[in-house]
Image: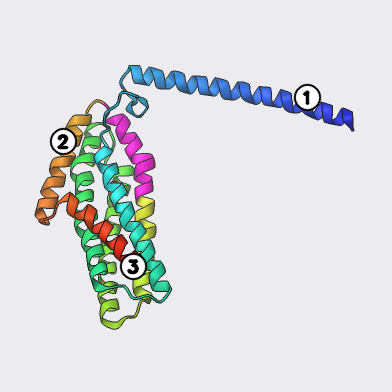
Amino acid sequence: MHEDNTSRNIFTSAGDLLLAGVLCSQTFMTIKLVVILNQLNYYKPFSKIRAMSPTDSLRKDHVLIEKMINALRTMSTLLRNGNSIPPTILEQTIEFSTNFTNTCHHGKEEESLFPSLEKNGMPKEGGPIARMLYEHEITKTLTDNLRKSAELYISTHKSEELLSDIDKYINHVTLHLAKENQRLFVMADMLLAGQDETVTNDLENIEQVKLNSSKKTRKYYEDLVERITLQENSL
Ligand SMILES: [Fe+2]
Ligand SMILES: [Fe+2]
């Protein structure tokens, strides 16, 4: 019994050593690669002196959109528990989804980020850009559905359709944001390294144009999400 344990310990130690060796060599290779890419000014996300990345402005939008998604999750729970949702909350949610998410944020991606990526070698057809454009169209359709079912809920107080549309919207947008955060934006930060300021300025100019077109400010939308969250907490 003692011998078995000893041999198992020895085997485990040998296995651990082997595993540690493999991990060390993999870690070393990864660090070496990152250092070389940093020296070439190619892989900015690992740079400690990096002040901004080309996707910072879009990631900031995602944080705000995620707050609205959380408000929609609360709305879904409230409806399932039999609570009533005031029409103003629904109207403000749909206005945010239409003007901030679809017009402003998607506008920044479609009119600035995607063309910049194309210029830097990412094909428009058959790759991530085409997929994201397709998903933006789905978001628009889901927003329209949400608008119709909210109107139906306000006039009839029947919540089945609204609940189903809220859940579909949450699932789609959550997955879309995750794909961009974890894949597209990582690729974009690499492809657009060294163009941080140009890309950021372009994104901010488009944001201003889009917000002006809906006669709103970024602060307005930030406050709106906070307001909806507070109102939901008091229901
Ligand atoms: Fe997008
Ligand atoms: Fe996005």
- Name which quarter of the figure residue 9 lies in: top right
**Label 1 sits on residue:** 10
* Residue 81 appears in view: yes
Question: Of callouts 3 and 2, which one flags the residue occurring earlier in the amino acid sequence?
Answer: 2
Q: Inspect the image, locate mark 3, and give the three-letter code of the amino acid beneath it.
A: Ser
Under circle 1, the secondary element is helix
- What is the crowding at mark 2: few (fewer than 14 residues within 10 Å), some, or many (at least 20)? some
Assess mark 1: CB under 8 A from ligand 2?
no
Residue 217 rendering spot, x and y as whole percentages: 14, 51
Assess mark 2: CB under 8 A from ligand 2?
no
Q: Nearer the viewer, mark 3 or mark 2?
A: 3
**Label 2 sits on residue:** 201
- Considering the whole magenta stretch, tell me its main secondary structure: helix
- Name which quarter of the figure residue 39 lies in: top left
**How far apart, in angstroms, are the residues tagged by discs 3 and 2?**
40 Å
Region of the chain picked out in magenta, as a range: 177-193
Query: Which quarter of the image is occupied by the C terminus?
Result: bottom left
Q: Are marks 2 and 1 in contact (CB under 8 Å)?
A: no
Q: What is the number of the mark on residue 234?
A: 3
Q: Please tell me which residue is depicted at 26% across the width and 68% down the height of the picture.
A: 90
Q: Against 81, is 61 above or below?
A: above
**How far apart, in angstroms, are the residues tagged by discs 1 and 3?**
61 Å
Q: Against 224, is 5 above or below?
A: above
Residue 209 relative to residue 34: left or right: left
Question: Of callouts 1 and 3, which one flags the residue occurring earlier in the amino acid sequence?
Answer: 1
- Name which quarter of the figure residue 185 lies in: top left
* Residue 169 appears in view: no
**How far apart, in angstroms, are the residues tagged by discs 2 and 1?**
60 Å
